Amino acid sequence: MTDLATDPDLGDRVRGVDLLLHELWLTNEEAERDPEKLAIHSHLAGVAEFARAAGVRRLMPIHHHPSRSPRDLRRLCAQLQAASGIEVVVPEEGPCLHAGWVRGRSSSWCIDTAPPPPIMVGT
């Protein structure tokens, strides 16, 4: 889910999914400084609450601000995991994630073609 504010009404569409890929554009501090952006982008507390309420098993933040370094992103993921109580997968360029079967066809999502697997927070 990307380019949208967190919307609790969408929770039924993702309820119980194994891995939710959700935008995480704003930190809580950025959202407080510029609340108008919350109309078009998601922030950490909103994503944490949305994922927890929807009962997702794992969460991967995507579509983050391009100025964030890998270190910034790992820090955000740790904060997201603490806030949500849900396992958070740190996105990295390279890994392909097998998405299972969609309408009778196998589906995968790739960021690039490099081989390393995603890093799990806390490992």
Image: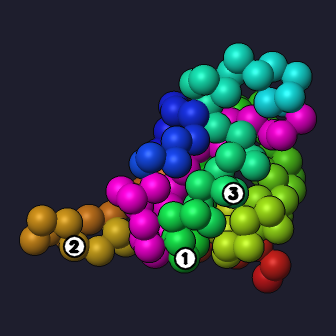
Left or right of residue 78, residue 4 in this image: left
Could you tell me if the residues under marks 1 and 3 are in contact, i.e. CB atoms within 8 Å?
Answer: no
Question: Is any atom of residue 59 visible in this view?
Answer: no
Q: Are marks 2 and 3 in contact (CB under 8 Å)?
A: no
Q: Which residues are magenta?
A: 11-29
Q: Give the Cα separation between the discs numbered 2 and 3.
A: 27 Å
> Residue 81's spot in the image, x, y percent?
76, 67
User: Compared to 77, does 68 lie above or below?
Assistant: above
For this view, does 98 lie left or right of residue 116? left
Residue 44 locus on image (x, y percent): 74, 47
Looking at numbered disc 2 in the image, what kind of residue is underneath it?
Answer: Trp
What residue did someone put label 3 on? 48
* Distance in Å between CA atoms under marks 2 and 1: 18 Å
**Residue bearing mark 1:** 57
Amino acid, disc 1:
Arg
Q: What colouring does the structure picture have?
A: rainbow
Dot 3 amino acid type: Ala
Residue 49: quarter of image: bottom right
- Residue drawn at x 22%, y 73% as measured from the top left: 101
Asked which secondary structure carries label 3, the reply is helix
Where residue 63 sits in the image (x, y, percent)?
59, 40
Q: Earlier in the sequence, mark 2 or mark 1?
A: 1
Residue 50 drawn at (x, y percent): 59, 55
Q: Residues within 10 Å of mark 1 (few under 14, many from 20)?
A: some
Question: Mark 3: few, some, or many residues within 10 Å (few <14, many ≥20)?
Answer: many
